[in-house]
Image (tube, rainbow, N blue to C red):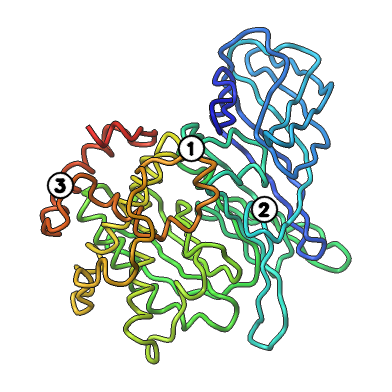
Amino acid sequence: MAMDRVILNPKVKPTHYVLELEPDLEALSFTCREDVHLTVSEAGLSAVVLHSKEIAVEDASLRFVASGETASLEGVAYALKATTVTLTFDKPMPVGDVVLSISYRGILNSDMAGFYRSYYTDADGKKKTMASTQFESLDARRAFLCVDEPAVKATFAVSIVLPAHLTALSNMPETSTAHLPARKGVAYKKVAFGVSPKMSTYLLAWAVGEFDYLAGTTKGGVTLRVFSPPGRAAQCAFALDAGVRALDFYDDFFQVPYPLPKLDMLCVTEFAMGAMENWGLVTYREAALMIDADKASIQQKQRVAIVVAHELAHQWFGNLVTMAWWDGLWLNEGFAAFMEHFCVDALYPEYRIWEQVGTSRPTRITFIPLTVSASRYLRLWWSVHDGRLRRGAAPGQPAHLAPHHRAHQARRGGRAGRHTHKHTRTHTDTWMS
């Protein structure tokens, strides 16, 4: 443990996760069968330690890839304060590739963190339940056993078993749907999604519920869909237009194409933040995504455009290139805060967005370090939307520097950074030097 960080043994490193989830929206619980592909670089280890919170392990085993041998579970020990679980086996692991298979249960909590439930009212006035994820910063461990550190990237393959009338979403496009035998008269299906790019655990996402949607396509051929509660898809039209145009703008500006084949934007009816940039499945608070474009005020349209532009900027900065730890959050958010204005100014010049910078939300604290610890970050969630992190949009730059000049610097430095650190993580010093 380093300071407020619970850093796990780097000698046992996940490279790929396979998750088969089955949520129960009535019981507000879920089960999962998980395979974690590990690379072990230290001989003699007979225990695997992973981040875990509010998860009950039912069984686990190891398979040593080179020899085909297996090891059986001997013990499970939970460290509640550290939010870890130690799985001990009857054989030590060899150096090389190992597959850890786990079965466990969890809860669909009401904390708007981890894998949680939300309620909404459908077009007929009936109360319905949906379930979705919010993993930033340290809550992936509430949905699956993992090394929940932004620097430890892996690929992910997700499948979800659910009643046939519900929709399942995840970061990647659906690759197959298998119809399953009915249970108590209810038809079921298993939806499988493609393997994700290499990414941090906090960017993994999935959702289950009844949704309507509108769809569009970017110039690069990326399908963009905006999902709403049933009967309200028309309120997604403005966000869809903003999303398609912003994705095209960033493709051209960064000269690095958006790397996924689709991008979904989902309205989550109970949501703690404004939005979350999960790669390929961005989640939003209702007011930040859904408006009646014919009746909405200019301020409401600006809010949706700004939030969409912010989250889509993260698809490059934050997702493709990620901070090594949460004390680098200022860079992640600061760059997106600058790009949201630059993008909206290009797409909607009538908003005169640069003239509004610094006038709508006074900074509450005059001096604060750019880097903050993870524990402080957790206590100050609201600071993501406060002016202090927006100062990260141009550290060391004069406040009066012309936006187009800052954009030129962002384009030049950003291209170099992404090509150098693509699919990896960076430290604050990398960008401050």
Secondary structure under the numbered disc 1 in the rendered image: loop
Task: State the residue at coordinates (47%, 62%).
Answer: 275
Q: Quadrant of the C terminus?
A: top left
Disc 3 vs disc 1: Cβ atoms closer than 8 Å? no
Above or below — where is 225 with respect to 378? below
Identify residue for label 3.
409
Identify residue for label 1.
150
Task: Give me the disc on residue 417.
Answer: none
Q: Is residue 384 rendered to the left or right of residue 273?
A: left
Number of residues whose C-alpha sits closer than 10 Å to that of mark 2, classed few (under 14), some (14–19) or many (20 or more): many
Q: Among all residues in the image, which is located at the extreme right? A: 184
Q: Nearer the viewer, residue 20 or 412?
A: 412
Q: Nearer the viewer, residue 346 or 53?
A: 53
Which callout, 3 or 1, points at the residue further toward the start of the chain?
1
Q: Position of residue 226 (x, y in %)?
A: 47, 70
Task: State the residue at coordinates (64%, 49%).
Answer: 159
Identify residue for label 2.
160
Q: Nearer the viewer, residue 420 or 330?
A: 330
Q: Position of residue 337 (x, y in %)?
A: 31, 57
Q: Is residue 293 rendered to the left or right of residue 114?
A: left
Q: Amino acid at mark 3?
A: Gln
